[in-house]
Amino acid sequence: MSQIKSKFKWHYLWLAAILLISIILNFYKLGQEGVGNTYYSAAVKSMLDSWHNFFFNSFDPKGFITIDKPPVGFWFQTLSAYIFGFKGWSLFLPQALAGVLAVALLYHLVTRVFGLGAGLLAALFLALTPIVVAADRTNEVDSMLMFVTLIATWAISKAVEKSHLKWLVLAFFLVGVGFNIKMMEAFLVLPAFYLFYLISPKLTWTKKLVHLLVATIVLTVVSLSWSVIVDSIPSDHRPYVGSTQDNSMVTLAIGYNGINRLLGQQRGQQGNFHMGSQQGQPTSGWKNTSQAHQTAGFNSQSSMGQQMYSRNTQFMRDMSRNAGNHFSGFGQTGNTGLLRLFTTPELDGQLSWLLPGVLISVAALLWGMRFRGPLDRKQQTVILWTVWVLTMFIFFSIAKRFSSYYMVMLAPGIAALAGAGFKQMWYQWRSKEKKETWFLPLALVCTVLFEISVVWKYPSLRDPLSIVIGVLAILALICLFFVQKLNASGKRAISIITMAAGVLALVAAPTAWAMTPIEYGGSVTKPFAGPELKNQHESDGMASNPQLENYLKSNYREGSYLVATLNAMSAAPFILDTGLPVMAMGGFMGNDPAITVEKLQKMVKDGEVRYFLLQGRSFGNQQSAVINWIKSNCIVVPASKWQDAQSKPSEDQEWMGSRNSSMTLYEYVKK
């Protein structure tokens, strides 16, 4: 009995240590990230103003247009900001907390099936996954989605164990909630869920199909509930649905946040531009640089187009000169293909460290399984996590439009299979069965070699980190052979050394990557981790212009818009700095037909908007009629009244569309 209690205490001590690591990685120096992605943080500030803005996920305080995501994740951020005040860390708090809770929940899910050692390993692997840490420290909602889908995984596990419909309905209900966090991305878990329930041996096929049909109906209703409610409300009583051409939330879900992610389609000429603040200062970055010259709205065959295209190419080349000579936070997906997650410099260091070991782990876990016979609990769960990983691996291998932090959803599956697999391979090695014993050294060698190949791309880390990984791996391999040869009394000490060296060899590189958002400050617009973060702050595309804000505030009339801009990237800083309504006439990037000339004429005549801030270079031509009307019917406000000398941008900042680049302020004066 005393021995059992001793093991119990040691086990929870290790769990507490892993959770402490996760807390430190997620929360330490969280405030250094400023207010995060200003597009989303401006929306949260607007949602604090009214229940109307809160429900509709409005970007601006007057509810003119929505952001490009559903509301549930941002509802949590708004609640946090309401409780703790509108600060950067309060916006990040829900995601950081969700990341820690996900580690604890994954430990529970793996432990209840594969045992304590597997659960601890899985929790450790998830806590140290670099892209998860990076996303946890921002106001992007992927970490919240990961946590909700893990709760759904717990529910469907209960459904399979107890063969009760209520647990299955709960699981699919939670996936529907996940849909209202980040739309179609939540559905990536569904193939694993459906198959997991279908292979349950406790129910007849008829009951399984009926149960899944009921659960699917619940999933559909919950998923589309908010979108359908929004679409059913007359357009003049709600904000325009941002990032759509037809003002439909269902279109946003299925198109922009669904099929377009896989096929890489854009609406019209629209690009995808995010901006955020690094350590309190706004920055900007491309979401999809492969189409940057198209979204800039010029013809590369013209002389001016050739000049701008050359500048773009040189600019991106300069931005790529970093520790790994590959990555700057721009264009994070590489080329499509099944080796994409192994060979793309922008992806392999974010998530793929354990993938070689996971492939071998699946073989070890399913070794000897008879597919024609009933599956036991462990085999069913292995299939669940394998299909989870396989579905997302295929999606991220062939998808043409996503950012690396979307792969947060893949992390729990990798961690679960790696934790369960390495524990299983350890027991197989000790069992001395000829065919099974070689899984463990093979998995260790393949994983370590892959990790060193990733580290090798970074000259500053190549020697020290490769040596550490190599020495630990060699020590573990040497000790492995002693484990089999020593008698029982001598195995305990050598086993501890073997396990410690092996685990440290596996996590050394991911840990180095996971610590970089703390060390260098994270990228809040496109979260990633790695040595590249050291140089990311060198390009600050946007600078504050207090003189412009003061000028607009001095002429502001309550109930009206402070100013109207072409896009949200220009409007967000004004909302954050002043808290006053700012109209992003074209939505996120400036190509949404959210306002017509007729509507704008009525608004200016009614005194709702007086000032217009236009940039010299427009990203797209969807608003050309509106822009022409403004230029024809408004007067130019002399720059001397609102622009100070410090706000003048460099050439690259000007080309990138910074807040102060080639700006002209127009005023409508009643005749």
Image: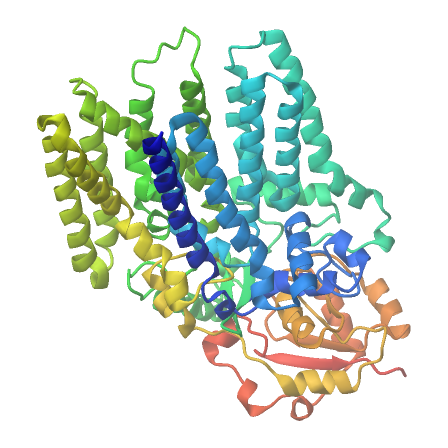
- Image coordinates of residue 284 in percent, x first then y, are 52, 67
User: From what the image shows, is residue 484 above or below residue 58?
Assistant: above
* 221 on left or right of 206: right
Label count reads 0
Q: Is residue 235 visible?
A: yes
| Residue at the front extreme, as displayed | 2
Q: Nearer the viewer, residue 177 or 537?
A: 177
The N terminus is located in which quarter?
A: top left
Residue 662 falls in image quadrant = bottom right
Q: Nearer the viewer, residue 584 or 168?
A: 168
* 33 on left or right of 464: right
Which coloring applies here?
rainbow
The C terminus is located in which quarter?
A: bottom right
Q: Residue at x 44, y 65 (%)?
A: 309
Q: Residue at x 72, y 54 (%)?
A: 57
Q: Is residue 328 visible?
A: no
User: From what the image shows, is residue 655 above or below residue 346?
Assistant: below
* 148 on left or right of 309: right
Q: Nearer the viewer, residue 376 or 51?
A: 376
- Image coordinates of residue 668 in percent, x first then y, are 81, 80
Q: Nearer the viewer, residue 606 or 462?
A: 462
- Image coordinates of residue 298 in percent, x first then y, are 54, 64
Q: Residue at x 70, y 81 (%)?
A: 665
User: From what the image shows, is residue 1 above or below residue 104?
Assistant: above
- Image coordinates of residue 538 in percent, x first then y, are 40, 74
* 405 on left or right of 84: left
Residue 519 falls in image quadrant = bottom left
